[in-house]
Image (cartoon, rainbow, N blue to C red):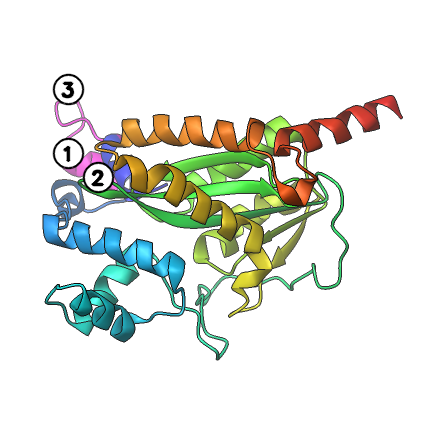
Amino acid sequence: MSLERRRQMIEPEHPRLSIVRQCELVSISRSGFYCYPAGESPLNLELMRLIDAQFLETPWYGSRQMARHLRREGYTVGRKRMRRLMARMGLVPIYQRPRTTVPHPEHRVFPYLLRELVIDRPNQVWCADLTYIPMRRGFLYLVAVMDWATHKVLSWRVSNTMDVEFCLDALEEALAHHGRPEIFNTDQGSQFTSPRFTGVLQRAGVRVSMDGRGRWMDNVFIERLWRSLKYECVYLHAFETGSEMRAGLTKWIGYYNAGRPHSALAGQTPDEVYKADAMTRLAA
């Protein structure tokens, strides 16, 4: 359970339990209840929006190159500031050497199972990924679960932290509403290598696959989803609040699934291809 959710469980006016005792029960320190991290300045939020837009164009930019780019745009920034903001956003550049996602040292990393595999039917392979979503006065993180063959977004969640909780919520919703895939593929981010996340998949009888480090193209379809979502929705609206963002994402993802034809799907929408296969299997 995230720190924020544990904070919310504490009742300062509880008639019998002191705040100290409640903190002990939910396993946080008293200072952890009272201390909230300071938000980013308006300038840093603007820089983060610019970094995010540029990173979609040049995902190999590290902190040094990103600082140079923003200086050319008229901002007085240094490499240390870029490194901190990019880390806050969860952005890791793609280098020629195999060094992109750093796994949690205590988490198991599963082998990549999709090499030379023909993926041609729904629920054969699902994938999941995280991205940073900028707002006018802050930012959130978005996770989505996608069916690889049809490109249908099966579930999604937003969060203000990068913990495993909202990733688990998205996974469990996808499994509850769409059955289970044969293989589930992710990168080696700590949320996806968490025993809690992989345990849900293994208990459901799903084979777990993870991209090799430096292999961002292994999850290329969901990377394309992020690009389309940001250029067609997020950057156009500059959402003020989390509720506005959720409403905007709900509308756009609904359009993406049901109203947007894909050339890779012979001009059909993800929903049409996904549902057509379900009808075929029922008829058989």
> Dots 3 and 2: beta carbons under 8 Å?
no
> Where residue 139 sits in the image (x, y, percent)?
26, 44
**Left or right: 154 as drawn, with respect to 67:** right
**What is the magenta range?**
9-24
Q: Which residue is mark 3?
A: 15
Quarter in which the C terminus is drawn? top right
> Dots 2 and 1: beta carbons under 8 Å?
yes
Asked whether 12 falls inside the magenta stretch, the response is yes
Amino acid on which disc 3 is placed: Pro
Q: Which mark is residue 225?
A: none
> Where residue 110 sits in the image (x, y, percent)?
61, 61
Within 10 angstroms of label 2, few (less than 14), some, or many (20 or more) residues? many
> Magenta region, mostly helix, strand or loop?
loop
Q: Is residue 231 visible?
A: yes
Asked whether 272 falls inside the magenta stretch, the response is no
In-front residue for pair 224/171: 224
> Where residue 118 sits in the image (x, y, percent)?
77, 54
In-front residue for pair 66/107: 66
Amino acid on which disc 2 is placed: Cys
Q: Secondary structure at mark 1?
A: helix
Q: Which residue is mark 2?
A: 23
Residue at image point 31% right, 32% down: 245
Q: Secondary structure at mark 3?
A: loop
**Left or right: 181 as drawn, with respect to 96:** right
In-front residue for pair 26/84: 84
Q: Which residue is mark 1?
A: 19
**Left or right: 59 as drawn, with respect to 43:** right
Q: Quadrant of residue 100?
A: bottom left
